[in-house]
Image: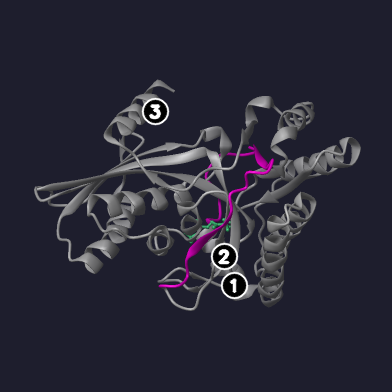
Amino acid sequence: MTAIGRARAHTNIALIKYWGKRDKALFLPMNSSLSLTLDAFYTDTQVIFDEALTEDQFVLNGQNQTDSEVIKISQFLDLFRRAFKETRRAQVLSYNFVPTAAGLASSASAFAALAMAVNQALGLGLDRETLSTYARRGSGSSTRSLFGGFVEWDMGTTSENSVAQPVDDADWDVGMIVIAINTSKKTVSSRIGMDHTVSTSPFYEAWKESAKHDLVAIKEAILARDFQTVGQITEHNGMKMHATTLSANPPFTYFEPETLRVQNLVRQIREVTGLSAYMTMDAGPNVKVLCRASEMERLVAELAKDFPNDKIITSLPGQAAYCLTEEEWRESERRFYDD
Ligand code: 2P0
């Protein structure tokens, strides 16, 4: 007997960052966070639970994955197997539609898509909020990829209520530009970077307190559709997160010289042209710019004067994770190999 599920989830970029866990086993965060789901980047996943399989399999972008990658997926599937008394092993096939040039991690979309696909395969009937608690245990940022637009991940008090919730569909002239500076694997993974920061930065308590206020303020600004305030809070919050890495012991940073150059460029474009452009950086050197969708083309033209055009990728807000039909899945496979 086999059971099949297929789903798509988009990646997300945090405007209020998740940076630190209070419980590493359960992926409970130190603070609530808020993100924008992006339309341009997503993962499509098919899972088949099959009695005939003796072990889990994981094939990503057509490549069999290493044992350590398979173990991560197995442990994730075990969460469902344990909760729903499922004994079958599974084959997981995934395609990441995240341009290599974008240099974006795909763990956020990956575990959200897998949670959604498992839910369908096993007929669990779990809602998105509950699925977000499962996705969380694959990767924290994945919690937020179950929903579209602006999404809050409430830190919660327990594993059951540390969930994502939609805040706003972001359908009011919002966009994001990814400026890819270096797409090679990061030297300090976000998981290690955040743990090190929590345990050594004297600024960490201040970060948590500050992020709490930023979250309240950005939600108010989002609901008021006050783009400038959303942008200013985003930029400030991202910089504060990076300040905690500089104050860790030993200190480290994800910024590269080119990151600083692009930050200055964005500031300069904003000041000279009056275009709305607010930057944020994650656990890597790339710069993401929150902007007006209607100004994206002009902004790209400005950026392209000083930065290679093929490293500038635009996106509109993305939608919530959803199940794929068999036909959509086949189409997605074809597109992956055609591109
Ligand atoms: C975020 N980041 O909120 C923050 C901002 C990076 C900087 O979530 O250990 O891959 O799997 O929970 O989710 C990246 O960390 O970490 C991340 P784990 P994850 O988007």
- Mark 3 vs ligand 1: CB under 8 Å? no
Residue 171 drawn in magenta: yes
- Mark 2 vs ligand 1: CB under 8 Å? yes
Percent across and percent down for residue 164 are: 50, 62
What predominant SS class does the magenta segment belong to?
loop
Q: CA distance from mark 1 to mark 3?
A: 39 Å
> Quick one: label 1 or label 3, which is nearer the N terminus?
1
Mark nearest the camera among 3 and 2 is 3
Residue positioned 84% across, 41% down in the render: 270
Residue positioned 35% across, 51% down in the render: 116
Which of the 4 image quarters holds residue 60? top left
Residue carrying label 2: 194
Q: CA distance from mark 3 to mark 2?
A: 33 Å
Residue carrying label 3: 336
> Quick one: label 3 or label 2, which is nearer the N terminus?
2
The amino acid sitting under disc 1 is Val
Label 2 secondary element: helix
Q: Dots 3 and 2: beta carbons under 8 Å? A: no
Residue 184 drawn in magenta: yes
> What span is in magenta?
160-189
Percent across and percent down for residue 282 are: 62, 52
Please identify the residue farthest to the top as the structure is shown. Answer: 338
Which of the 4 image quarters holds residue 242? bottom right
Q: Dots 1 and 2: beta carbons under 8 Å? A: yes
Residue carrying label 1: 198
Q: Dots 1 and 3: beta carbons under 8 Å? A: no
Q: Considering the image in quadrants, where does the C terminus appear?
A: top left
Residue positioned 74% across, 44% down in the render: 257
Residue positioned 52% across, 45% down in the render: 185
Numbered label attached to residue 184: none
- Left or right? Give the position of 25 relative to 70: right
Q: From this view, report whether residue 139 is shown above or below residue 7.
A: below
